[in-house]
Image (cartoon, rainbow, N blue to C red):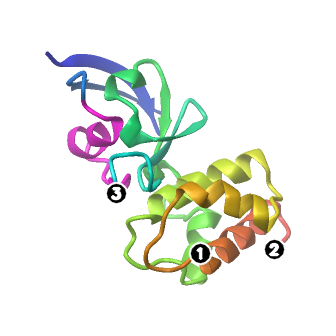
Amino acid sequence: MATHVKTSINDEPVEFLCEPHESLSSVLRERLQLTGTKEGCTTGDCGACSVMLDDRLVCSCLVLGVEAEGKSIDTVEGIAKADKLHPIQQKLLEHAALQCGICTPGIVVSAKALLEKKNNPTEEELRFWLAGNLCRCTGYDKIIRAVMDAASVMRGEV
């Protein structure tokens, strides 16, 4: 039996129906057409489905849609503002740190979560933070350089 859920997604009130066993990633992609969140593994190992749930970074494949009741969700779709990319998105493009795009939304959400908590992380801290985001295409050096560059932009140094 479907459950009615009221939540906020990217600062907009949202209501949806979902089955009690349905993952949040499935709800986002299939019911709400927010397909930026990718499903890579469905076991919480790859990080492609990372979203913020009440300011906590989670793998949405491990959260049930019904658990979103009354909570605030931030997805990759809410990161760019109008037609202006977030510095993390811009720097990933500039550093050619993207290829197939499956991991990219999770990396963007995860990196933003870190930089909001710690605006000047060391490379080691950033690598540790992004360790849950797997990328099969690019390797990680370009991603790390791009996020470190974005951090300096966000601090107003560039």
Considering only vertical position in the picture, is 126 above or below 13? below
Residue 84 in view: yes
Please report contact status of discs 1 and 2: CB closer than 8 Å, yes or no. Answer: no
Q: Secondary structure at mark 1?
A: loop
Q: Secondary structure at mark 2?
A: loop
Q: Residue at x 26, y 17 (%)?
A: 4
Give the number of marks: 3
**Mark found first going from the N terminus, 1 or 2:** 1
Circle 2 Cα neighbour tier, 10 Å, few/some/many (<14 / 14–19 / ≥20)? few
Residue 132 appears at what percent x and percent y? 55, 55
Circle 1 Cα neighbour tier, 10 Å, few/some/many (<14 / 14–19 / ≥20)? some
Is-magenta flag for residue 34?
yes
Residues rendered magenta in the picture: 22-39
Residue 2 located left or right of residue 127: left
Q: Residue at x 59, y 82 (%)?
A: 94
Q: Residue 40, which numbered label?
A: 3
Residue 31 appears at what percent x and percent y? 22, 38
The residues tagged by marks 3 and 2 sit, at their Cα atoms, a distance apart of 34 Å
Is-magenta flag for residue 72?
no
Return the residue nearer the eye: 123 or 78: 123
Point out the image quarter for the N terminus: top left
Q: Residue at x 76, y 67 (%)?
A: 153
Return the residue nearer the eye: 112 or 77: 112
Residue 107 appears at what percent x and percent y? 53, 60
Residue 60 located left or right of residue 140: left
